[in-house]
Amino acid sequence: MVQSFASIVCLTAFIVVLSTSNTSLHVLSISAAGITLFATRSLPEATTALLIFLAFLAIDVAPVETIFSGFATGGFWLLVGGLVIGTAITSSGLGDQVARSAFVYTGGSYRRAVWFLSLAGLALGALVPSAIPRVIVMIPITLALAKTMEISPGSRRHTGLLMTAVMMTLVPSYAFLTANLPTIVEMGAIEILYDEHINYGSYLLQNAPINMVRFTVLLFMLLAYQRGEVELNKSQLASCKAPTWTHKQRLLLLVLMCAIALWATDTWHGIAPAWIALTVATVLLFPGFEFFQEQTMKTEIDFSVAFLIASVFGISAVMTEIGLGEQIAGFAAPTLGLGKGGSGLWDLTAIAGFSSALSHLTIAPATPIVLAPLAASMSEATGWPIASVAMAHNIGYSTTFLPYQSPPLLIGIALAQIPIGALTRLCLVSAIVTSVIGIPLTWLLWVGLDLI
C-alpha cells in the first residue's frame, strides 16, 4: 500500500512536469515526490536525494549553486560531524558507560527510562542552542541504555525509547528562546525588520501553555509503548553501578563536554554549532588520538544520510529562489480572515495553522524567512503587537505533524533507524491533540496578560 502510494505521487509529479510550463508547479511536484519517497523509504535515501538533484537540474529551475546549496549549509556539516561523534560514542564504549550510569536511576523500568530521557532532553534544550547536536548526543546513549536494559531492537519499547530521545529533545524545547534554529531566525528577523526585542523571560512565559501540553501529551503517548518491564539480576545491576572507564572513554567524554560547552555559549563566542561539530569530528578522526581505525571512514561511518539532509535543504533553497513560499503566502494569507470574525482565538489558530502548513511545504528553519515579512500585515489585520504575531508564527512551525518537517527528526531517523511509521503516527497524533488543547490555553493566557 505504501509503495503504491509513493508510485502514484511520483507518477503524478512526472505528468505535471511534462504537461505544464508552470515553474512553481514543477518545483512543488518534484518536492512532493521526493518527500514522499523519503517518508515511505521506497528507495534508499541517497538514491532519492540524487533523483531530486537530477530533476531540478533537468528542469533548469534554479542555478546549480542553489540546487546544491544544501551541501554548504551548517546543517549538512553539523550532521557530518555528528555522524563521526555518534560513531565515536558508540565504538569507544562511552555510550555504554553513560547508559550504565543512567541505569542506576532507571533500573529495568521502561517508564523511568522515558522520564529520564525526557528530562535529559529538556535540560539539554536549555543549554544547547541547536536541536541537531542534542539529538546527536542523545541517540547513541539511548541505544546503549536500551541494550543495557536488555530491550530487543525492533520491539515497541525499543522504538519508544528512541522516539523519546528525538521528540523530547526537540519538541518541548521550543519553550526556550535559544533552543532551536527556526525560533532564532524568526526573532532575529523580527528585530531587524521591526526593531522589536523579545527577551528570554517573556518568550518563556508566553509559550509555556503550548509547551507544557506538548510535554504532557508526548510523555503520555511514549509511556504507552510499555509492554511489561525487564528486571535484571543483582550481578547485572551491580556491574551497571560500577562501570570501568578507559582512558579513551575519559578523553572522549572531555572532548564531548567541551563541545557541549561551546554549543551552549555560541552567542558569546560566535562560532557556529556546525563548525564546532566539524572540529570535534576532525580531532576524533586524527590518527594520533586512535579513536578510530584507518579504514573507519570507509567501513564504520555511513555518510549516505547526509545526502538526504542536503536534498531537503536544497528543496527549501529552490523554493526560496523561485519565490514559491511568497506565492503561497500571498495567496493564502488574505484568505485567513484575520480580524474579521471578532475572535482572537480564531486569529491565533489561523496564524499558527498557516505557519505550520508552510513549514511542512518547506522545512521549519526556512519558514521564518517567509513569515517574518508578513508580520506587519498580520499585526494590522488582527490589531495585535508584532511580537505576538511572531509568537503565533512560532507556535505553528514548532508544531510538527510529519517528521520530514524537522531536520533534527530526520537525523534521528538516520542515526537510530527509527521506524518512520511509528514516528509519523506519534508526530501526527501529538500535534493534533496539542493544538486542540494548547492553542486555546495559550489564547487565554495571552488575553489575561493583555498581549492580544
Image (spheres, rainbow, N blue to C red):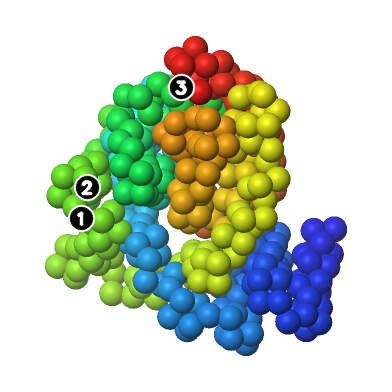
- Spatial separation of the CA atoms under disc 3 and disc 1: 35 Å
Decide: marks 2, 1 in contact (CB < 8 A)?
Answer: yes
The residue positioned 62% from the left and 21% from the top of the image is 440
Circle number at residue 271: 1
Q: Nearer the viewer, mark 3 or mark 1?
A: 3
Taking depth in this image into account, of 138 and 197 the one nearest to the observer is: 197
Q: Are marks 3 and 2 in contact (CB under 8 Å)?
A: no
Position above or below: 280 against 210: below
From the top left corner, tell me how far across and down residue 369 is, in percent: 45, 55
What residue appears at the point 57 percent right and 32 percent down from the top-left corner?
Answer: 382
Question: What is the three-letter code of the residue carrying label 3?
Answer: Leu
Question: Which numbered mark, 3 or 2, is in the foreground of this view?
Answer: 3
Which quadrant holds residue 336? Answer: top right
Where does label 3 land, which residue?
451
Residue 308: x, y in percent?
53, 66
State the residue at coordinates (21%, 45%): 267
Q: Give above or below for 275 relative to 223.
A: below
Instruction: Give how far across and how far down residue 163 sits, in percent.
Output: 55, 40
Q: Residue at x 45, y 48 (%)?
A: 372
Q: Indicate which disc, 3 or 1, sits on the residue closer to the N terminus.
A: 1
Q: Amino acid at mark 1?
A: Ile
The image quadrant that residue 243 belongs to is top left
What residue does disc 2 label? Answer: 266
